[in-house]
Image (cartoon, rainbow, N blue to C red):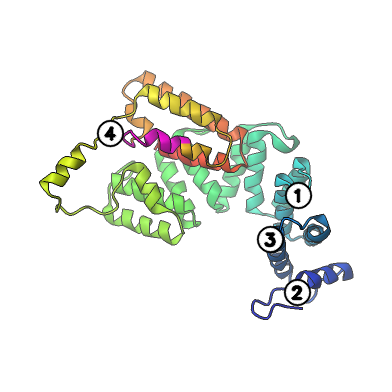
Amino acid sequence: MKNKKTDILQAEDLQKMYEKGSFAPHSPEKIFNDSKYNYNVLKSAPFFGEETLGIYIKIYDKLGEMGYAPALYELGLLHFNGEWWLEQDLKKALDYHTKAVALGNTDAMFELYVYHSTGQGGVKQDNKVALEWCKKAAEKGHYRACFNMASFYATGNGVKQDMDESVKWYERASKAGNGKASATLGVMYKMGQEIKADAEKAEEYFKLAEEQLFDLEEFLAMFGIERYEKKNQKSAKTTKKDTCKTLPLPTKDDFKTLIEGLCKATKTGEVRKIYDSFYENKEPISAMSIVETDEDVKLIEKWVTLIYDRIADIAGTDAAEELAEVADEIFR
């Protein structure tokens, strides 16, 4: 039976083909995509477990035996995250991802970066090896890996700080579809940070970020940036009112408290809540703006290390992604 509207193979069709031992005449890609669609639909109902969903694990395994890398990558994710009916098994997840990497899967390469940066799956925690995997994935065009490499070069995390190299990786991430990278480049061109200010190019990147479904408005608000120059149409009364809203600049102690709080966050949304609360009554400036002496530089380096060590500790979680995003904003 097929869904006439979408032509997606249904659960019973897929199970029959699996039991028969052949997916012909369908391609591995077709079987994988339809299986994943059915799995996600059924997964949304809390009463379905291994009896119903286990068939998709078997189908992915079969596709993996046929050399279809995306199925191996998906199996790795399932075992990495676990489900209420599927016990988390990080070693098995690593095994699947390693097999996917052998077949050239860039998503799996990025996962190996996660394993080695955190020491999960039975591997020894090794930031140098982790960086190598991140770079391999980035060189293959992986959008998240490209963005990470840009962040690493911007902050000097694991590599020598090099803003020219950072910009190159942001550009690659942008071309790979990373909306945040596009927005970041837009801000850099808008503000003239490490790049010659160019309002036209800034707007091009802002538009691209929107096309890539990135929340540009919220991103710019965090930087206190107005996308478009405001017309000088405000009354004297309005101008006076705005002047009264000038917020205090964060101090070194303020930033120290922020970093300590972020490093204690563990839940999704908690990182962003701490960050937003910090800037609620302060000017949204970068921590880099406090640098005046060599001691200040060392202080920034210490904070960067604390943040990225924490990211490595909780890598693979939504909180880690949030913390990486916030770090980029704090140390921009």
* Rendered image quadrant of residue 119: top right
Mark with earlier residue (1, 2) = 2
| Lateral position of residue 36 relative to residue 49, left or right | left
**278 is within the stretch colored magenta:** yes
Q: Mark 4 sits on what residue?
A: 247
Q: Mark 1 sits on what residue?
A: 96
Question: Measured along the vertical axis of the image, is residue 227 above or below residue 126?
Answer: below
Label 2: element kind: loop
Mark with earlier residue (2, 3) = 2
| Lateral position of residue 120 relative to residue 208, left or right | right
Mark with earlier residue (3, 4) = 3
Q: Residues within 10 Å of mark 1 (few under 14, many from 20)?
A: many
Q: Quadrant of the N terminus?
A: bottom right
Check disc 2 and give the amino acid type: His
Instruction: Kindly report which numbered mark, 4 or 1, lies closer to the viewer in this rendering.
Output: 4
Mark with earlier residue (4, 1) = 1
Which residue is pictured at 43% across the width and 62% down the height? 211
Q: Residues within 10 Å of mark 2 (few under 14, many from 20)?
A: few
Which residue is pictured at 43% across the width and 53% down the height? 215
**Residue toward you, 233 or 135:** 233
Instruction: Kindly report which numbered mark, 2 or 3, lies closer to the viewer in this rendering.
Output: 3
Residue 61 in percent (x, y) is at 80, 57
Instruction: Kindly report which numbered mark, 3 or 1, lies closer to the viewer in this rendering.
Output: 3
Residue 28 in percent (x, y) is at 74, 67
Q: Residues within 10 Å of mark 4 (few under 14, many from 20)?
A: few
Mark with earlier residue (3, 1) = 3
* Magenta residues (range): 274-284
Label 3: element kind: helix
Label 1: element kind: helix
Residue 104 in percent (x, y) is at 67, 54
